[in-house]
């Protein structure tokens, strides 16, 4: 974070203390939101957020910032709808402009079987008060005049589900809004501090070991993206998580022209135009597990080709940069939030490619869980023990991955 | 470009292969057979380091192979 940004925000940095009520590992959206809600809603301000690099440097700063709730199972729809509501209130609540813009999301279908699942999605969304409607190709063209309805001759558009309240927000500003709100209430954010182990007392986790010394804690929460298996291993917690890279790229900035967000769950790619005019284009995650953040030419080529089938104008755009993040993909493609079976150690993980939209709700609910010591009803279905209970929250079709 | 060494076909680009995942290996201190089976099905070591895994040579000999790869840098070892 540079000096210019720091003077815009009121952030106060602290030296680490030796003990806190709550220590949160990971200074991304989920970690900082949890700290914010602990301080703002529950009056728990003796909190430290430990970040290995700078805040928002992980997946929160690498995602494609789409906020939506058009999921395919009731538990997820309720959770993400709540998150959408909190995003809508975030600017008023924190007094920070997060560049929240409602754009609508067109979720394209190219086959009869895809149309069938979109019909089911629309019905389920409507039953839970989420505005998702089925639209035909003519309506798709009205919403997005640039689209080639023949899909380059290969992927004809048969229709789409249109998720009206879908929005985007500026990811850094979300991080800063929560960091500022938490710090103003007394939360310590420790950047450039790497967790190297967990302190144990018998079966209990009683703190964290860092490269700047040991820190005792009443509760330790893991909110890391990418290295959660390593952290959980320190507490001997086994996780149904595999870490895959996810890549994305942006073009140079162009005049505003692409209104809605376009997503294609058969070609597995999505596009939106950012506030500064860049076309932000993403893709499903890479096949093989990896912690590498290297971005590849193969990705750029295959993704650019797919997008040019749908939106021929992207052929003429110049690519500015590409990058990769690490996605913790859970076995059932839904998040894992709550207790781990080890006292003093709670977790928020399994955010795969779908974590940004859940930052406010995930943070709010985890703060309630830490403050009250019991699991809130909204996230009870996403507990880690659901796998042993054979209640998996399988909803891969709503994640844009294969 | 990532190169996979196939025992039948030699060195080939990774695009010819399908990833088959890490070979499940529950912790050795897990002795209860039910818990072990559960771990085998659902849990992953997901190491940031050298991992033993399966690959299927889809655009080649159509056989499975076992490889070791360092997941922290995404390179095959040996």
Image (cartoon, rainbow, N blue to C red):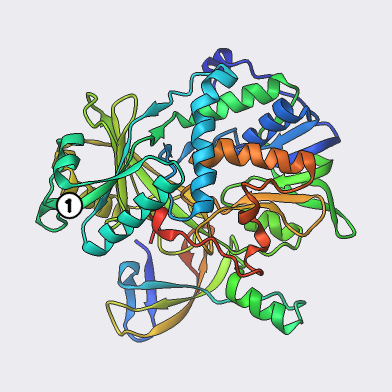
The residue wearing badge 1 is A157
Give above or below for A16 relative to A118: above
Quick check: A180 left or right of A110?
Answer: right
Q: Position of residue A28 (x, y in %)?
A: 59, 37
Left or right for A244, reference A343: left
Residue furthest to the front in view is A127
Under circle 1, the secondary element is: loop
Identify the residue shown where x is 62% and y is 77%: B40
Q: For the image shown, how many numbered marks are present on the structure?
A: 1
Q: Position of residue A317 (x, y in %)?
A: 19, 36
Of the pair A119 and A103, the residue shown nearer to us: A119
Residue A355 in view here: no
Task: In this rendered view, identify the residue nearer to me: A320 or A387.
Answer: A387
Q: Residue at horizontal 37%, vertical 64%?
A: B2
A361 or A218: nearer the viewer:
A361
Which residue is pictured at 43% across the width and 37% down the height? A65
- Which residue is outermost to the top? A7
- State whether residue A163 is above or below residue A100: below
Could you tell whether A196 is left or right of A254 in the image?
A: right
């Amino acid at each position: 974070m540079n000096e210019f940004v720091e003077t815009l925000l009121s952030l106060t940095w602290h030296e680490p203390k030796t003990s806190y009520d709550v220590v949160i590992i990971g200074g991304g959206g989920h970690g900082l939101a949890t700290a914010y809600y602990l301080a703002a809603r529950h009056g728990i301000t003796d909190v430290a957020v430990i970040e290995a690099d700078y805040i928002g440097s992980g997946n929160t700063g690498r995602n494609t910032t789409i906020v939506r709730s058009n999921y395919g199972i009731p538990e997820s729809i309720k959770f993400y709808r709540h998150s959408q509501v909190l995003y809508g209130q975030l600017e008023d609540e924190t007094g920070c402009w997060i560049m929240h813009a409602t754009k609508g999301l067109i979720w394209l279908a190219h086959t009869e079987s895809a149309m069938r699942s979109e019909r089911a999605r629309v019905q389920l969304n409507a039953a839970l008060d989420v505005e998702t409607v089925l639209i035909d190709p003519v309506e798709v063209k009205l919403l997005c005049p640039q689209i080639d309805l023949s899909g380059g001759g290969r992927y004809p558009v048969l229709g789409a589900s249109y998720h009206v309240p879908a929005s985007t927000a500026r990811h850094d500003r979300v991080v800063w809004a929560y960091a500022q709100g938490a710090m103003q209430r007394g939360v310590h954010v420790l950047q450039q501090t790497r967790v190297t182990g967990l302190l144990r007392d018998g079966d209990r986790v009683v703190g964290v070991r860092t490269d700047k010394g040991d820190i005792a804690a009443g509760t330790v929460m893991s909110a890391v993206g990418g290295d959660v298996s390593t952290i959980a291993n320190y507490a001997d917690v086994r996780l149904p998580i595999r870490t895959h890279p996810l890549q994305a790229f942006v073009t140079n900035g162009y005049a505003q022209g692409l209104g809605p967000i376009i997503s294609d769950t058969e070609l597995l790619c999505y596009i939106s135009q950012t506030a500064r005019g860049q076309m932000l284009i993403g893709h499903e995650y890479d096949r093989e597990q990896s912690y590498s953040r290297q971005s590849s030419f193969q990705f750029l080529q295959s993704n650019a080709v797919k997008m040019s089938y749908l939106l021929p104008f992207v052929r003429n755009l110049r690519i500015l940069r590409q990058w990769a993040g690490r996605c913790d993909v859970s076995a059932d493609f839904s998040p894992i939030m709550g207790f781990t079976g080890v006292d003093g150690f709670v977790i928020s993980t399994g955010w795969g490619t779908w974590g940004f939209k859940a930052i406010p709700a995930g943070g709010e609910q985890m703060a309630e869980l830490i403050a009250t010591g019991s699991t809130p009803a909204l996230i009870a279905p996403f507990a880690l023990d659901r796998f042993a209970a054979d209640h998996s929250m399988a909803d891969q079709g709503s994640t844009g991955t294969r | 470009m990532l190169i996979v060494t196939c025992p039948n076909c030699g060195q080939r680009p990774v695009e010819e292969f399908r990833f088959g995942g890490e070979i499940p290996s529950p912790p050795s201190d897990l002795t209860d057979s039910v818990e072990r089976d559960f771990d085998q099905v659902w849990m992953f070591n997901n190491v940031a380091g050298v991992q033993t895994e399966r690959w299927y040579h889809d655009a080649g000999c159509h056989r499975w192979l076992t490889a070791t790869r360092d997941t922290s840098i995404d390179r095959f070892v040996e």
